[in-house]
Image (cartoon, helix red, strand yellow):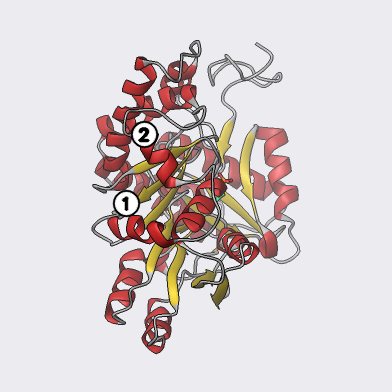
Amino acid sequence: MDAGTAASHVEHVHGKAGWHFLQLPGPTNIPDRIRLAMDRPAIDHRGPESAQLALGLFEDMKKIFKTDGPVLIFPSSGTGAWEAAIVNTLSPGDKVLMFDTGHFSKVWILMANNFGLDVEVQANDWRRGPDPDEIEARLAEDKEHKIKAVLAVHNETANGVCARIPAIRKAIDNAKHPALLLVDTISSLGSIDFRMDEWGVDVAIGGSQKGMMLPPGISFNAISKKALAAAKTAKFPKCYWDWDWMMADNASGFFPYTPAVLHMFGLRESIDMLMEEGLDNVFARHSRMGEATRRAVTAWGLEVVCANPEEYSNSVTAVFTPEGFDADAMRLQILERFNMALGSGLARFKGRVFRIGHMGACNEIMLSGALGGVQMGLEMAGVPIDKSGAKAAFDYLASVK
Ligand SMILES: Cc1ncc(COP(=O)(O)O)c(C=O)c1O
C-alpha cells in the first residue's frame, strides 16, 4: 500500500512503518469499523434502504445530543451547520451576544457580522471561556430584550477551553431574558458531556470529524421547540440550509438533495460504538486522557493555555512553548521524525502554541505514545523541560480507574 486509502493504520504509509499518530483536535482517527462500514457501493438515496438508515440516525443522534427534539444532518463541514443555525433562527439586523474567546469563536463572530447581524462582543485573553456573570449583567441591562440570541462555543478547540454552558444558561435565566442559546459542540460532541435539553440549549451545532470519529463531511443541527418557533419568523433568505425544507423530507427518511450516504453508514457505526462503550464511559476516558496530558505538561514545566481549571478541555490540550521556541518548527520535526501530527497554534497563538488532540478513537496507550513523542520533540527542539513529564501522565493513568 502506498497510500492510506485502503490500508489499515498499522501498514506502511508513505514509506513509514507503524501508525501515523494523528493527535489533532480533529480530524481524528477513523476506526477501521467505521472505515469498513463506509467502504461500500453507493445506494439509491431515494430508496428504502437509505430511508431506513436515515430514520434510525435521526432517532439515535438525539441520544448523542441528549435531546428529544429533531436533529438534522447536513452534507457539510461544521461551518455550514453554524450558518444553518443563524439563518433559520434570526433576521438581518438582529442583535446577538457573542464571545471573542478563541479562534473558532472569533470566526463565528465574523460569520455573524457578514450576515449583517448586530453583533455585541464580550472579549477576553483567549485563556478562558465566556464569563457567565458578565453575560447575566449584560442581559439584565437589556430590558427591551433587543438581544435575540447568545452564541457560544462549548469547547474552544483552539485553546482547549471548555465553556460552562450550564452556567451560561443559568445567567440567561437569572436575567429572565428570552434570548435563544446557540451552542457549537463541534469538538465536544461524543467526547465531553453535552446535555442539550437539560441545559436549555436551543440549537446545538455538531460536526462529524472529531468525537464522532468520521471523516469531515457531515454536520448537525439539534433544535429545541423554542428554536423551531423562532424559525417561523426568522427572515434570513435560505434554501440549502432551510430547516423546513429539510424536515419535510426527513419525516420519511429522505433529504431535499443528495445526502452523504456513505458518511451515514459510517455514522451508524459511530453511534453504535459510542453506545456500546456507553457515553459516560466515553466521557470518563476523555477525562482521564485530559488529566494525564495536563499532568505531563505541568511536569515538563510548560504552561497549558486554559487558565481556568474549571474550564479545562478533556478533548484537546493547548500548550505554550517558552519564549524563543517556535511551536510550528517543533511540530514539523515531530512529524518528520516520529510520524505524529499535532495541532498548530491558531491566529494570535500561531507559533507560540501546539495542541495535543486526545479526542475520538484514542485511548490511554495511544496517548502515552503521543506524550512520549511530544517529550522527545521538546528535547530535540532544545526546550528546557523536566524529563519526568511523560512519567507523570503514566503514573496518573496507572493509578486511576
Ligand atoms: C469549535 C469549532 N467550531 C467550528 C469549527 C469549524 O468546523 P469545520 O472545519 O468542520 O467547518 C471547528 C473546526 O475545527 C471547531 O473546532
Image quarter where the C terminus lies is top left
**Residue 211 seen in the figure:** no
Q: Residue at x 71, y 18 (%)?
A: 15
Q: Which residue is mark 1?
A: 193
Q: Residue at x 49, y 72 (%)?
A: 96
Label 2 and label 1: CA atoms lie apart by 27 Å
Residue 267 to residue 282: above or below: above
**Which of 80 and 198 lies nearest the eye of the viewer?**
80
The disc placed on residue 250 is 2
Circle 2 — which element?
A: helix
Question: Which is in the foreground here, disc 2 or disc 1?
Answer: 2
Q: Residue at x 33, y 31 (%)?
A: 57
Residue 98 to residue 206: above or below: below
Amino acid type of the residue that numbered disc 1 sits on in the rendered structure: Asp
**Which of 43 and 207 lies nearest the eye of the viewer?**
43
Q: Callout 1 environment at 10 Å: few (<14), some (14 to 19), or many (20+)?
A: some
**Residue 22 seen in the figure:** yes
Q: Position of residue 296 (x, y in %)?
A: 48, 53
Amino acid type of the residue that numbered disc 2 sits on in the rendered structure: Asn
Q: Residue at x 57, y 58 (%)?
A: 104
The quadrant where residue 55 appears: top left
**Residues tagged 2 and 1 counted as in contact (Cβ below 8 A):** no
Q: Position of residue 175 (x, y in %)?
A: 31, 82
Image quarter where the N terminus lies is top right
All told, the count of numbered labels is 2
